[in-house]
Image (spheres, coloured by chain):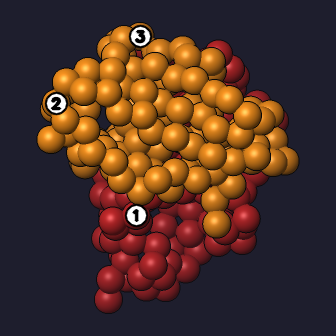
Chain colours: A orange, B red
Amino acid sequence: SSEVTQDPAVSVALGQTVRITCQGDTLRNYYASWFQHKPGQAPVLVMYGYNKRPSGIPDRFSGSSSGNTASLTITGAQAEDEADYYCNSRDSSGNQWVFGGGTKVTVL
Amino acid sequence: EVQLVQAGAEVKKPGESLKISCQGSGYTFTSHWIGWVRQMPGKGLEWMGIIHPRDLDTRYSPAFEGQVTISVDKSTRTAYLQWRSLKASDTAMYYCARHDTGSGWANWGQGTLVTVSS
């Protein structure tokens, strides 16, 4: 089982807000990063560190962290945000990386 | 511009060997970890392992230790993922990624689809 866990799926109405969470004890020591993954495409980094967005990622994406939980929030979800989202962090040893199981976001 | 370019799709038979590649450009190759990620059909992303080209420090995720070999060729700025004897369960998309100290795993290859079938 993964050291970080995510809910398998969530849906959001177009233009509404959705929060995706990632839980694991390793998140008390390491930031999570978040990837958006669409079919047939390479994963795209959308959030890293403490609420940092790579260049080109819309500001409707934001991140937060508290205790053993990291969150990715999409404020005003768009149709193009429909994708699988994976959290990623170091494992408990700090020497490896782990993904959460992924959350499928459906925009209704 | 940082780019990771992966080799094209492969179709192999069980028991065959395979080495797939990931060539980096647009950055100092020996300064950044490279990782390999598997996505089996209909499944999530899994870290397989990482390698630092400078000192060849290689770390395998437990599920992949002994199953694959990760290597680099500094002269060609290329990372490799290798199997000695493929199984049908190795059928998957494989991605390479580059780690940046500031932004994490920010750059990804386009993926190599490996199909293992008799």
The correct choice, above or below, for A5 with respect to A69 in the image is below
Q: Which residue is mark 1?
A: B43
Q: Give residue B14's position: percent from left, percent from top.
A: 43, 85
What percent of the width, then of the height, locates residue A12? 25, 38
Q: Quadrant of residue A69?
A: top right
Q: Callout 2: 10 Å neighbours few (<14), some, many (20+)?
A: some
> Residue placed at 68% from the left, 20% from the top?
B101
Kindly identify the amino acid type of the residue bearing the numbered disc 1.
Answer: Lys
Q: Position of residue B56 (x, y in %)?
A: 77, 41
Are discs 1 and 3 less than 8 Å apart at CB? Answer: no
The alpha-carbon separation of the residues under discs 1 and 3 comes to 28 Å
Can you tell which of label 1 and label 2 is closer to the viewer? 2
Residues at discs 1 and 2 both on one chain: no
Q: Secondary structure at mark 3?
A: loop
Give residue A56's mark.
none
Question: Which SS class for mark 2?
Answer: loop
